[in-house]
Amino acid sequence: MSESERNYGCFGGGMRGPVLLTGEANIFYFTGFRTTARRPKQIGYTAVLLTEKEKKFFCPKKWAGQIHRMRLPDQGELIPYGDSWEAFVAALKEELGKEEKSFLWTEYRELSLPLYQELLPLTGEIRDITGKTEALRLIKTEEEIRHLREAADIAVAAMEYAKTVLKPGMRERDAAAALEYFMRLRGSDGVPFTMKLLSGENSAVVTNVPGEKELETGDLVLLDFGATRNGYSSDWTRTFCLGKASKEQIALYEAVWKTERACIEKIRPGCTLEELMETARLTVEGSPFAPYYATHLGHSVGIGSHEWPVIDAGASGILKENMVITIEPGIYVPGLGGVRIEDEILVTKDGHEILTGLAEETFELI
């Protein structure tokens, strides 16, 4: 599907009622508009209204000139409104008032309660379209794949750089800042999530973020991060040992590496998410680290670094050509540390292509 086809008809036949999109990712997907100026008083409120005949893009008047200069080929009709919440609601109500009073499709997770309360009397029923938008964004166009490659390439270069700069005595937060700066210099628009650069026992707790801890010789150092480029994200992970690794650390790393590679080898159109989960389970089974294996195996990547579907317990679905997913098994052992290895994978016509990876895969940084 080309960008010019991102209109009401892309949801397929049988749809009735207008579609209102208020989430940043879907506004970008359907119009091409994006900005990192997301403080409410700077950007205000934006929305896209799709009907069978029209696409309307609502924005504050103060942004109209900049949006015109962006020359977005698929933005639809621009509807500037006075720079206030009340003006935004009034503009939406005016346009929705022109539509048949049936029901309104929107993203439940993105629609605010105040806006829901304002619109419900006007439409009678509000239905969730999240599943349809997620399915649309799952299969990538050639242009989207190009942007995803660029974001992945920047993150890969940063991981190569990390191999040269991580030293005992560095604070986790300082090392993370150096890598983020490196990616900015190479064209990243920012980071899609808070970088994980966790050392020693910190690496065994997936909710940790870089802190004051200093890297020490013998530490496991887990790095999970991505870049953003032209609105698209990357996300990948490597775990290193700072210095000579112990036999237990090597065994842990090898268990995770073996699991990741076994799952990647399965990737092809028609492979199910259940098959990937079972491959990971069977590969880890029998390992002394099996009790510490985390079932979260991966997810889709696109505009966001973590999109639907998530490959985890209870997941279902089938891989299709031009999906981009991650495979990221992790084993986290209290007292020893955690190892996660993650790569981005493009599902191709006949198999897969790994978009991330080091020129020389290394565990020990000596």
Image (cartoon, rainbow, N blue to C red):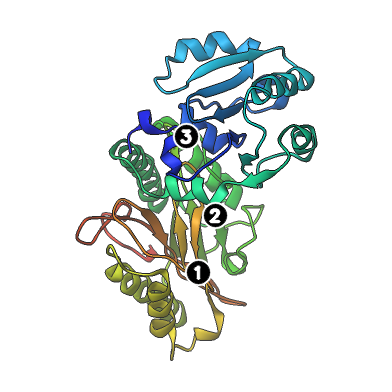
Identify the residue position indicated by label 3 in the image: 8
CA separation in Å, label 2 and label 1:
28 Å
Discs 1/3, front = 3
Q: Nearer the viewer, mark 2 or mark 1?
A: 1
Q: Is residue 135 left or right of 21 when viewed as pictured?
A: left
Q: Are marks 2 and 3 in contact (CB under 8 Å)?
A: no
Quarter holding the N terminus? top left
Q: Residue at x 69, y 40 (%)?
A: 111
Q: For the C terminus, which image quadrant?
A: bottom left
294 relative to 75, above or below:
below
The residue to which callout 2 is attached is: 197
Q: Is residue 302 visible?
A: no
The label shown at residue 359 is none
Dot 2 or dot 1, earlier in sequence: 2
Residue at left 62%, top 77%?
334
Comparing 160 with 147, the one in front is 147
Mark 3 or mark 1, which is nearer the start of the sequence? 3
Q: Residue at x 57, y 48 (%)?
A: 130
Left or right: 65 as drawn, with respect to 280: right
Calculate the distance from the C-alpha at mark 2 to the C-alpha at mark 3: 42 Å
Q: Is residue 89 above or below residue 206?
A: above
Q: From the viewer's perspective, is residue 303 above or below residue 189?
A: below
Q: Front-most of 21 and 13?
A: 13
Q: Secondary structure at mark 2?
A: strand
> Is there any visible trace of residue 43 in the rendered image?
yes
Label 3 element class: helix
Where residue 315 is drawn, which disc sits there? 1
For the residue marked with disc 2, what is the amino acid?
Leu
Pick whichever, 240 or 151, lies toward us. 151
